[in-house]
Structures are given as C-alpha cells and as structure tokens.
C-alpha cells in the first residue's frame, strides 16, 4: 500500500518495525513450542517476551508521534 502511494518510511521507523517484528515472531514461536511440548511452566517467560512486544509498540508509537511533531515523518507512513 505505501509503495502504491510512493510513500517512504524513515530508516528509524523501518529499524524499529523490524525489531518489533522479530520479538513478535519470537513470542509466537515460543508460544507454539510451549503448547507442542506441554511446557506450561514456561508461560511466565512468554509473558516477559510479550511485555517486550508491548514496550516496542509503545516506543514505536511515541517515536512516530515525535517525528510527526518535528515534521520529519510523512503522516501517511
């Protein structure tokens, strides 16, 4: 969609999205592993990873708002 509109994201935003995506994928893979191995004792560790995902999301939103306020970011991105 962004490509169709010829909108580019900043390198910072791309890096942050990649980092959040990696942690999100780790969380999903870990959750699948827990259920496949019936290792429900590892659920607290999963919550820790999910908290990291939440932290990334909050930082990504805050940094995006900062870039918008500084006019260094395209609002469409």
Image (cartoon, rainbow, N blue to C red):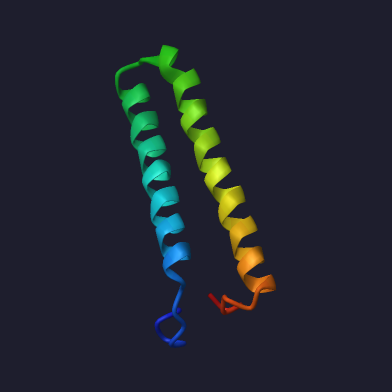
Can you give x and y, in whole percent of width and height, for residue 33 in the image? Answer: 31, 27
Can you give x and y, in whole percent of width and height, for residue 28 in the image? Answer: 39, 38
Picture quadrant of residue 32: top left
- Along the line of sight, the residue nearer the viewer: 28 or 17: 17
Picture quadrant of residue 25: top left
Q: Residue at x 60, y 64 (%)?
A: 64
In the image, farthest residue toward the right: 69
Q: Is residue 37 left or right of residue 14?
A: left
Q: Is residue 62 left or right of residue 50?
A: right
Picture quadrant of residue 76: bottom right
Can you give x and y, in whole percent of width and height, for residue 55 in the image? Answer: 57, 42
In the image, farthest residue toward the front: 70
Q: Residue at x 65, y 64 (%)?
A: 66
Q: Residue at x 36, y 30 (%)?
A: 30
Is residue 1 in view from this perspective? no
Can you give x and y, in whole percent of width and height, for residue 8 in the image? Answer: 44, 79
Q: Residue at x 56, y 55 (%)?
A: 60
- Along the line of sight, the residue nearer the viewer: 32 or 56: 56
Q: Is residue 68 above or below residue 38?
A: below
- Along the line of sight, the residue nearer the viewer: 29 or 62: 62
Q: Is residue 15 above or below residue 35?
A: below
Tell how many labels.
0
């Amino acid at each position: 969609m962004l490509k169709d509109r010829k909108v580019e994201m900043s390198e910072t935003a791309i890096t942050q999205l990649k980092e959040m995506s990696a942690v999100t994928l780790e969380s999903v893979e870990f959750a699948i592993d827990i259920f496949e191995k019936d290792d429900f004792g590892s659920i607290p560790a999963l919550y820790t990873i999910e908290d990291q995902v939440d932290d990334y999301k909050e930082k990504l939103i805050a940094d995006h708002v900062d870039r918008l306020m500084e006019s260094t970011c395209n609002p469409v991105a």
